[in-house]
Amino acid sequence: MQRYFVEQIKSNEAILTGDDAHHIARVMRMQPGDELYCCANGKTALCTIAEITNEFVKAAVVQWVEESNELPVFVTIASGLPKGDKLELVLQKGTELGAAAFLPFQAKRSIVKWDAKKGDKKVERWMKIAKEAAEQSHRAVVPSVYAPVSFKEMVMMGKEYDACIVAYEEEAKQGEKANFAKTMEQLQRGQKVLIVFGPEGGLAEEEVRLLREHSFIACSLGPRILRTETAPLYALSAVSYYFELMR
């Protein structure tokens, strides 16, 4: 059954506009009486379509659905800006795997240089990718997608989290295996963790040094060196396994 995110569900009614209304009426060719899910503020309602116009679709709540499809911990993926559409892949698949937020940052070895003046449309596209992936994976919440920040700004944002991790390939080369698991063991449900990944070429030594100085825990993600778009998905899968399958 189709799932859509709305700003609010008021008086047991949801109003869908824009692309969602077009998708319902023109793509799915749904009719009054058809059922769909509407999500708002982390809650999900089974609804029936009450009215379809050229501007909006009105849906009436049949019942609220009790479900828990969100990761028990809030994971923010901080990615050093990569080339091409690699970040879009991380956004889409990372949303499916349960990330709560995505924080791109300008790393020393980032080949792409962020132009804030032209960036609004790109951020809008990223947010749309996350929304569509959240609908597809039956999540109740759309992850937050931040506009890219500087490396130092990202480091300072770490103060808002209960735990901060940096995936560092040199740790893998030296055989480090325990830090990621230890961090997961110390986290409680509802807490927040920030996981940092470098761009192509990895993080520079001085960047890792600064992260360590601000209590970021350097860890490996196994013995193999993962690509910048693969590592966040591995980490999210590991978090899901630990909190959702082992417990």
Image (cartoon, grey):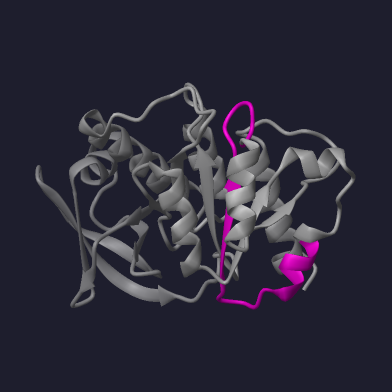
Give the x, y percent position of residue 137. Answer: 52, 51
Q: Is residue 152 above or below residue 35?
A: above
In-front residue for pair 225/234: 225
Assess whether residue 38 is covered by the magenta stretch.
no
Location of residue 109 in the rendering, given as x and y in whole percent from the top left corner = 54, 28
Residue 97 visible: no
Residue at the spot 65% in from the left edge and 78% down from the top edge: 188
| Residue found 63% across the figure and 26% down from its top | 201
Q: Nearer the viewer, residue 222 or 190?
A: 222
Q: Is residue 175 left or right of residue 99?
A: right
When the figure is inspected, residue 189 is found, relative to residue 88, above or below; the finding is below
Total numbered labels:
0
Residue range in magenta is: 181-203
Q: Is residue 168 left or right of residue 90?
A: right
Residue 41 at x, y percent in the picture:
34, 69
Nearer to me, 71 or 82: 82
Could you tell me residue 36's position as x and y percent?
36, 57
In the rendered view, does 13 fall on the left or right side of 94? Answer: left
Image quadrant containing the C terminus: bottom right
Q: Does 183 lie within the magenta span?
A: yes
The residue lying at 33 percent from left, 73 percent from top is 62
